[in-house]
Image: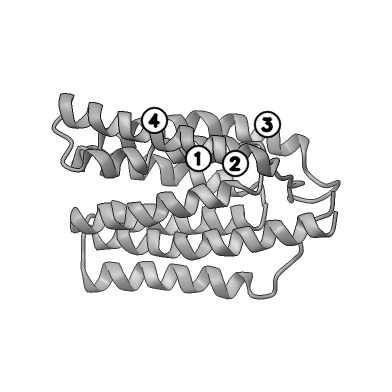
Amino acid sequence: MSKLPKQTGMWLFLVTGLLVQIITFCLIPHSPWAMISGVFGICSVVLSAQGNILTFVFGFVQVATYTYLCCVERFYAEIAINIYYFITMIYGVYCWRKRLYENTMQVQTRRLAPSFLPLLAIAIVGISFLTGWLLESYTDDPQPYLDAFTTIPAIVAQVLMVMAYREQWYLWLIVDVLAVIMWLRAENYCMAAQYVFWCANCIYGYIQWSKSLEKK
């Protein structure tokens, strides 16, 4: 396995994301926790796209602040998924440390078998619909199906991320697009801006991890 290539544009990409987050907060103020979550979230995902284990350091702060925001909005599935994130990130540090290139902070990447992807997609869609129905029927969640479809794919994507599989980026892109819609409906434009950037980062991350695999 080969090392993820260094990109001279990484810092520019990161700074752009941070500026978008801060400017959005200044123009449309919301809870300061939204900006804190956004800033740490952007740092975390850019480092993840680079395959850098420091992604988990920023990720822990982002998860804690984002969970608080979800509690305020009563996004119950999102609350549950963030508790799951926190637990799996602890395990993720252990897994990535075992897969680091010698004397680096970079993880060795891998790919799923193409034949496995259709089965995975069918299972995710079915479970997401079921979760949305349960939230609609038994909670006061204002956006049950959006909440479900940003939660179930994320559960799978997180497992793939912890195990260093490139295909995580397909699922994160779906989750992030739906999360933009969810937070726009909640009128939290700072969080929506974060997820818009995360959509771009999914493409960036997929390209980075693909380049690594091509050089295997």
**Residues at marks 2 and 1 touching, judged by CB atoms closer than 8 Å:** yes
Q: How far apart are marks 1 and 4 (CA)?
A: 10 Å
* Residue 47 quadrant: bottom right
Q: How far apart are marks 3 and 1 (CA)?
A: 28 Å
Q: Which of 102 and 160 is in front in this view?
A: 160
Q: What kind of residue is marked 4?
A: Ile
Compare marks 2 and 4 and give the one earlier in the sequence: 2
- Confirm whether residue 158 shows in the render: no
Q: How far apart are marks 3 and 2 (CA)?
A: 26 Å
Compare marks 3 and 2 and give the one earlier in the sequence: 3
Q: Name the residue under label 3.
A: 94
Compare marks 4 and 3 and give the one earlier in the sequence: 3
The picture places residue 211, in percent across and down from the top left corner, at: 74, 62
Q: Mark 4 points at which residue?
A: 127
Q: What kind of residue is marked 3?
A: Tyr
Q: What kind of residue is marked 1?
A: Ala
> How is colour applied across the structure in the image?
one colour
**Residues at marks 3 and 2 touching, judged by CB atoms closer than 8 Å:** no
Compare marks 3 and 1 and give the one earlier in the sequence: 3
Q: Mark 1 points at which residue?
A: 121
Q: What kind of residue is marked 2?
A: Leu
Considering the numbered disc 4 on the image, is that residue within a helix, a strand or a loop? helix
Considering the numbered disc 1 on the image, is that residue within a helix, a strand or a loop? helix
Q: Viewer-nearest of labels 3 and 1?
A: 1
83 to 22, vertically: above or below: above
Considering the numbered disc 3 on the image, is that residue within a helix, a strand or a loop? helix
Q: Name the residue under label 2.
A: 117
* Residue shown at the point (74%, 51%) measured from the top left: 106
* Residue 78 quadrant: top left
**Residues at marks 3 and 1 touching, judged by CB atoms closer than 8 Å:** no
